[in-house]
Amino acid sequence: MTTNTLPTRGRPRRFDPDEAVATAQHLFHAKGYDGVSVADLTKALGINPPSFYAAFGSKAQLYARVLDRYALTGAVPLSQILAADQPLAVSLAQVLEQAARSYAADPTATGCMVLEGTRCNDSQARDAACGFHVAAQDLIRNSIAERYPQEAARLADFVSTTMAGLSASARHGQGLDRLLATAGLAGMAIAQVLPA
């Protein structure tokens, strides 16, 4: 008597949503929101399109989750730096230095994912990125206003604009040394504006 036994497959890999979000974060950061397709995501995550939509709803909804993760793991820790017990000019200079370091940390995913996302073509994803960007600007402005209310608007704009420039420069291949030099010059400018 012979039996036909089919080869058994191993158990399918268990889908880990947190791991999937981390993988998607790297893709979005490296290629930008518009440069990543659902096909790219399903291939990287090892799932089929129906499973992707069941798990995340849409590409934009996944991106929103990625932005939440980025805020915790990859973004400049604004709250921590700005809450430090030190002169505000020192804190703001540290924000810019940390931005330069963060934006150049991974040569395959340079710049700030939030700032880059504010220019994407998908309105839902762009709105999500803009929400994070505006919250960061507000945090910087409010931290300045606590000590120097008359300087809050223009200094917050200067810091935000410098961060955007650092992100764009990193995205275009500028190395850490040059980014830090720019951050350092901006820090000196801030120190000239704020009294010691």
Image (cartoon, rainbow, N blue to C red):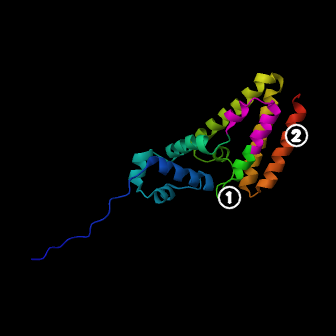
Q: Residue at x 74, y 50 (%)?
A: 168
Q: Residue at x 61, y 48 (%)?
A: 121
Q: Residue at x 80, y 39 (%)?
A: 93
Left or right: 70, with 182 as reference point: left
Percent x, y of residue 191: 87, 35
User: Mark 1 is on which residue type?
Assistant: Pro
Quarter that holds the N terminus: bottom left
Against 80, is 65 above or below?
below
Q: Main secondary structure of the magenta part?
A: helix
Foreground pick, 109 / 9 = 9
Helix, strand, or loop for circle 1? loop
Residue most extreme to the left: 1
Quarter that holds the C terminus: top right
Percent x, y of residue 20: 48, 51
Say which residue label 2 marks.
188
Q: Residue at x 84, y 50 (%)?
A: 181
Is residue 164 part of the magenta span, yes or no? no
Q: Which residues are magenta?
A: 77-97
Tag shown at residue 71: none
Say which residue label 1 marks.
107
